[in-house]
Image: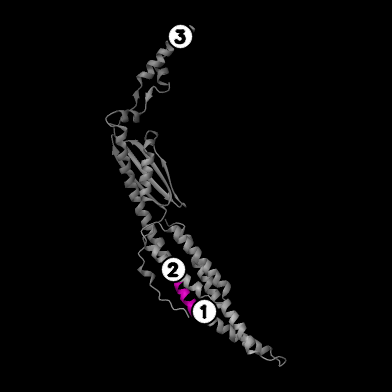
Amino acid sequence: MIVINYNSVMDVVPMSFSMTGYGQSALHYEGYKVVFEVKSVNHRYCEVVLRLPREWTCFEDALRRTVQQYVKRGRVDVYVNKEDGDEHAPHALLNEHAVQTYLQAAQDISRQYGLDGKLTVKDLLSLPNVWMPPEHNALQGDSNLEEWGPVLENGLRKALEGLTAMRSAEGKHLAADVEKRLRKLQDLHAEMLQLAPTVVEDYRNKLKQRLSDLNDGSFAFDEHKFGMEIAIFADRSNIDEELIRLQSHFEQCKGLLRADEPVGRKLDFLIQEMNREVNTIGSKANHLTLVNRVVEMKAELEKIREQLANIE
């Protein structure tokens, strides 16, 4: 008979993070209001998708690395929007070089092809590149483009801190639920430990009773053959190794839930291994009560697997 000392699952301090969360922040700089939104959902790996104004695409790699410092697994969508923050925000400027170019081109066409007509102010204002966008004015003014890098990174970090807080809170709930179901699995495992030694004895009694009922005196009871049959059944139905491996998997799961690192994929692998051991027990154990415990274990393992799909 296997004897295993159980350590309470209550000593687990959940450190897991959910892969679902949201964070937001905003800042004011150089007359602009910059809003950061960060959303994360389930994903097998770490995928970061950035959406930001075109003039800031040069900061994309640095911002992506910042996100990866906070998120190790999941799809993260980052939205960075720039708005006019006050009346002192820079406005669009007239592109004098473009205006001179259009006027010179109009004169050349008129002289070369003998065409009459002049460009009006309305015509000029409707032509491409006559106006320079406000961001061009801002970036060419008091602040350089490089100065926006640390500003954007700081704003993104504040949004990521909010995202992390939400992921941590949900992760604690997920880990607590997994912890509860691990406790249920260990209770079922303890019942299996008690039932396992009785399987062979029950089979021996039932087989002996059946032979007794069938014996009409036409054949003699062979104690040696009867013993061999029981020995074969005992070897075929032995589940000691599976029960020991299950207990080992329980301890590993508890350790991973305490770990301060992404553990979702490792836990998912352990649940697959537990499911394999439980299936083996079900196929080997020729005992109704044990089979019922196997069904209950498989139901709990499936619920744990669903929860792990959202743990980082």
Report the magenta stretch's main SS. helix
Instruction: Say which residue appears at 63% left-offset and 88% top-offset.
Output: 224
Circle 3 residue: 110
Q: Quadrant of residue 295?
A: bottom right
In the orientation shown, which residue stands out farthest toward the bottom? 217
Q: Position of residue 3 (x, y in %)?
A: 44, 78
Q: Left or right: where does residue 226 sit relative to residue 281?
A: right
Q: Amino acid at mark 3?
A: Ser
Q: Residues within 10 Å of mark 1 (few under 14, many from 20)?
A: many
Secondary element under disc 2, as helix, strand or loop, is: helix
Circle 2 residue: 250
Q: Amino acid at mark 1?
A: Ala
Q: Please tell me whether residue 40 belongs to the stretch shown in magenta.
A: no
Magenta span? 183-195
Circle 1 residue: 196
Specify which label sits upstream in the sequence, 1 or 3: 3
Q: Is residue 255 above or below residue 56?
A: below
Regarding residue 245, the answer to whether it shows in the image is yes
Specify which label sits upstream in the sequence, 3 or 2: 3
